Image: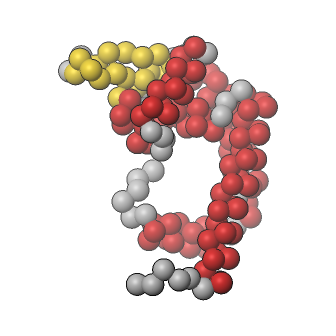
Amino acid sequence: MTAEITPQQLIVWRMLQRAQAHITRSLEGELLSRHHLAPAAYDVLLQLSENADRRLRMNDLAERVLLSRSGLTRLIDRLQRDGLVEREACPSDARGLFAVLTQAGDQRLSEATPTYLRAIRGQFLDLLDEEELRQCADMLTKLFPQVSV
């Protein structure tokens, strides 16, 4: 396999990078200005809310939100200061911790969700028809078959 790529391949790669950066910046601007939440913080609150008992082990949460353990720790520190999450000890592992969604965190998530959905719809979903969305999902699954959402 050669390290060389064609100009067309480079264009596609750059377009993918720019699309992701553009959508993320737009989403970040909306969430920060309206709800004082960065996209990563929104994702943490969402992941916790989707779990039946509104808690996840820190290691599992870091994997789900695509942050390093230290990056997640810093983010959880901020969310805890804001009263949006709490930490709880794990009874089965003295070194383990849970991040737990608080009522205030659930409320902030509920307030921010329409903004989040409007932003991703306006910047991405509404720009593609159903067939294009299916093709996009197929391509991303081909690139990352091991990734679960």
Q: Is residue 57 above or below residue 6?
A: above
Q: Position of residue 111 (x, y in %)?
A: 69, 28
* Quadrant position of residue 36: top right
Determine whether, in the image, residue 67 is placed left or right of residue 129. left
Query: What residue do we see at 34% from left, 21% from top?
Result: 97
Whether residue 21 is visible here, answered yes or no, is yes
Determine whether, in the image, residue 53 is placed left or right of residue 101. left
Query: What residue do we see at 54% from left, 27% from top?
Result: 75
Name of the residue lying farthest toward the left: 92
Q: Which one is nearer the viewer's eye here, 17 or 148?
A: 17
How many marks do you count on the picture? 0
Query: What residue do we see at 50% from left, 66% from top?
Result: 140
Whether residue 115 is visible here, answered yes or no, is no
Q: Is residue 3 above or below residue 71?
A: below
Q: Is residue 67 above or below residue 137?
A: above
Q: Position of residue 9 (x, y in %)?
A: 60, 80
Q: Position of residue 72 (x, y in %)?
A: 48, 32
Query: What residue do we see at 43% from left, 42% from top?
Result: 64
